Image (cartoon, grey):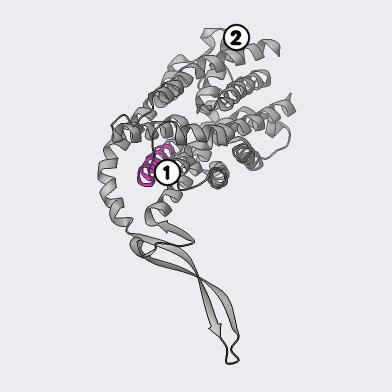
Amino acid sequence: MALLLIAATLLLAFANGANDVSKGIATLVGSGLSHYRPAVLWGSLCTVAGGLAAAFASQALVATFSGNGILLESGSNSRILLAVAAGAIGWLLIATSTGLPVSTTHSIAGALIGAAIVSGGTSGVAWGAVAAKVALPLLASPLLSLLIVVALLPMVRPLLGRVDRYCVCLEQRELVAITSAGTSYRERLSSIETRSAESCATPVARFTAVDLLHWLSSGATSFFRGMNDTPKILALGIGAAAAGGVAAGHAYMLVALAMGAGSVIAGFRVTHTLARKVTPITPSNGFAANVVTSVLVALASRFALPVSTTHVSSGAIIGIGVSAGDNALRWRTVARMLAAWVVTLPVSALLAALFVILL
């Protein structure tokens, strides 16, 4: 049972990476700043780094998602935790296969509740704690990120416009030299220069200041997502890992690497949804959305608030569309996303309940 629980925890981390890597990199792809593979690799690397940092910065989330505080009885029962992991994995795989960005946080919380109800009835759930620790942050975070982006963009655009006048250019020139004997040879020279954007017309590669800031903000979003999600996932298998002689630091590392593997192997479908199907994205808008997401998720990790990076980042991207106006938002995609968010908790609860019965 301990080995099964460890394996299920790592599979949940893999499924999380597949669905959630999009939250930090979708704006890179949507703004045309990067193709899918470089963006996914960048997001995966930063996610793994954030997962490793979670071992030092956000350990308090482990207690909440191991069942303590949500379940009235201890969540250390391996059978219950295995069912919770299976329920969350099932819903994440369904959502990822259809390209829908859903919340791992919401999935685990729903699975915990479903498993608890089947095991001990509704009285086994601390509903007040569920409302305060899970429901309120999950409901408030997307609305908060949307409102902040809408308020921030009009102030940020003029500032970024000034910064965007400068760029870093990688150029190649061909030098032709003629010797005294009349022979010639050619040599390619590379140079990296900082100059005004207008004078960098035909470079091999060109990065404006906003492009660089956008890449950094994308990395920050992925980093803090990894920091916030790793302890939630690890909570399900931390007891089994300890029983199997796996040190806590090594357990964090395994979960972080599994998240990275899921991102690299299966992180493209949901990225396409957020990058292409919600609203047109520019580098400056994407930068602002990533900064808002990074700050909110970092604060949530610091104070052990179980917010969903999915909800925060999706709310920020929707805020871009609301700010743009002129029907820039693709409401059909937004409606599908919201529907997926609504059914995440009950579907995860139902799947976990079924697994409790099977086990």
Q: Element type at marker 1?
A: loop
Apparent side of residue 13 relative to residue 277 in the rendered image (left or right): right
Tally of numbered tags: 2
Residue at (36, 33) in percent of width and height: 145
Q: Is residue 159 magenta?
A: no
- Quarter of the image for residue 181 reads bottom right
Q: Which residue is mark 2?
A: 118
Q: Is residue 241 above or below residue 294?
A: above
Residue 196's x, y, as percent? 34, 64
Q: Which residue is mark 1?
A: 31
Majority secondary structure in the magenta region = helix
**Is label 1 or label 2 in front?**
1
Residue segment shown in magenta:
283-297
In the displayed image of the protein, which residue is found farthest to the bottom? 180
- How busy is the neighbourhood of tag 2: few (under 14 within 10 Å), some, or many (20 plus)? some
Residue 313's x, y, as percent? 42, 34
Residue 265 appears in view: yes
- How busy is the neighbourhood of tag 1: few (under 14 within 10 Å), some, or many (20 plus)? many
* Real-space CA distance between mark 1 and mark 2, rounded to the nearest whole angstrom: 46 Å
